[in-house]
């Protein structure tokens, strides 16, 4: 992990700790937990770089966000537990966030709001009629990588493959294709109008290109 990434995320964490008025030792103790978790050896995409990218987007879109604390807490904690072989990463992440919330003396209302945001990442679906822009934008931050330039998208796709190294090639290719296709079959990838305008078109191109590549690879496995 590059030092500048760690430094950038640590600065955002320190600012958040001031903003929520966390007891001094809580910030430093939990930074150690966060940096250790996001630095686990099986992580290639779900690292502090992902948190940094989401925080960059947060700073970019900040004027659209009403509940700063909730969104930033959700960014930091949504992937704190990540085991590619587990099915309950999000609920485990919420449980760890709730431990932090006790240490940081957070209000119940804020805790339930952050937990709701993290829980939304399970399906990445949100009621299209909702006026919950904060949650929509948080979810869109998480999927913004899909709409990045081709080189960055390819790195993301490669990093996801590395995280699923325990899965054989043929199973991975078929599974990944199915996931991408189910996302493409939805009316929109992004929950907010803002992100649809900015990223939707490029994201769909990237994902279709990856499906084409996966199908080519699957073809070679069938021979």
Image (tube, rainbow, N blue to C red):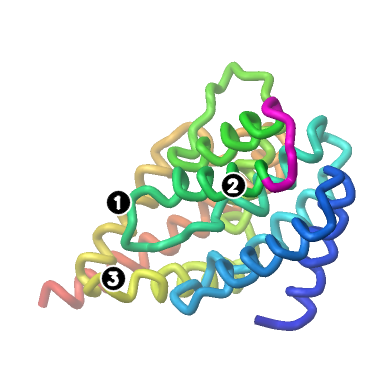
Q: In the structure shown, which secondary structural element does the residue marked by tag 1 occupy?
A: helix
Q: Could you tell me which residue is drawn at 78 percent across and 49 percent down?
A: 58
State how far apart marks 3 and 2 are (Cα).
Answer: 46 Å
Please name the residue that numbered disc 2 is placed on. 99
Task: Check if residue 23 falls in the magenta segment.
Answer: no
Q: Nearer the viewer, mark 2 or mark 1?
A: 2
Image coordinates for residue 142, horizontal then vertical, percent? 60, 50
Instruction: Answer above or below: position of 103 versus 86.
Output: above
Dot 1 crowding, Cα within 10 Å, few <14, some 14–19, many 20+: few
Please name the residue that numbered disc 1 is placed on. 178
Image coordinates for residue 187, horizontal then vertical, percent? 48, 32
Q: Could you tell me which residue is drawn at 28 percent across and 73 percent down?
A: 166
Q: In the structure shown, which secondary structural element does the residue marked by tag 3 occupy?
A: helix
Mark number displayed over residue 221: none
Q: In the structure shown, which secondary structural element does the residue marked by tag 2 occupy?
A: helix
Point out the tag, 3 or 1, that comes first from the N-terminus. 1
Please name the residue that numbered disc 3 is placed on. 216
Q: Could you tell me which residue is drawn at 65 percent across and 30 percent down?
A: 113
State how far apart marks 2 and 1 are (Cα).
Answer: 35 Å
Point out the tag, 3 or 2, that comes first from the N-terminus. 2
Q: Which residues are magenta?
A: 103-109
Q: Are marks 3 and 2 in contact (CB under 8 Å)?
A: no
Image coordinates for residue 120, horizontal then vertical, percent? 52, 36
């Amino acid at each position: 992990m590059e030092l500048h990434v760690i430094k950038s995320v640590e600065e955002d964490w320190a600012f958040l700790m001031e903003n929520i008025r966390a007891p001094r030792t809580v910030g430093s103790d939990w930074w150690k937990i966060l940096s250790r978790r996001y630095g686990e050896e099986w992580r290639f995409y779900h690292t502090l770089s992902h948190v940094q990218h989401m925080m960059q987007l947060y700073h970019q879109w900040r004027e659209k966000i009403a509940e700063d604390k909730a969104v930033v807490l959700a960014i930091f904690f949504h992937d704190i537990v990540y085991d590619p072989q587990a099915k309950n990463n999000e609920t485990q992440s919420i449980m760890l966030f709730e431990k932090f919330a006790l240490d940081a003396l957070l209000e119940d209302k804020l805790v339930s709001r952050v937990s709701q945001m993290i829980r939304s990442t399970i399906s990445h679906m949100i009621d299209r009629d909702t006026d919950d822009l904060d949650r929509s934008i948080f979810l869109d931050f998480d999927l913004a990588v899909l709409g990045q330039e081709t080189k960055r998208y390819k790195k993301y796709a490669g990093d996801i493959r590395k995280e699923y190294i325990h899965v054989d090639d043929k199973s991975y290719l078929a599974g990944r294709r199915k996931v991408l296709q189910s996302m493409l079959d939805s009316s929109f990838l992004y929950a907010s109008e803002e992100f649809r305008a900015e990223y939707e078109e490029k994201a769909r191109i990237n994902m279709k290109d990856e499906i084409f590549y996966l199908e080519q690879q699957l073809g070679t496995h069938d021979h």
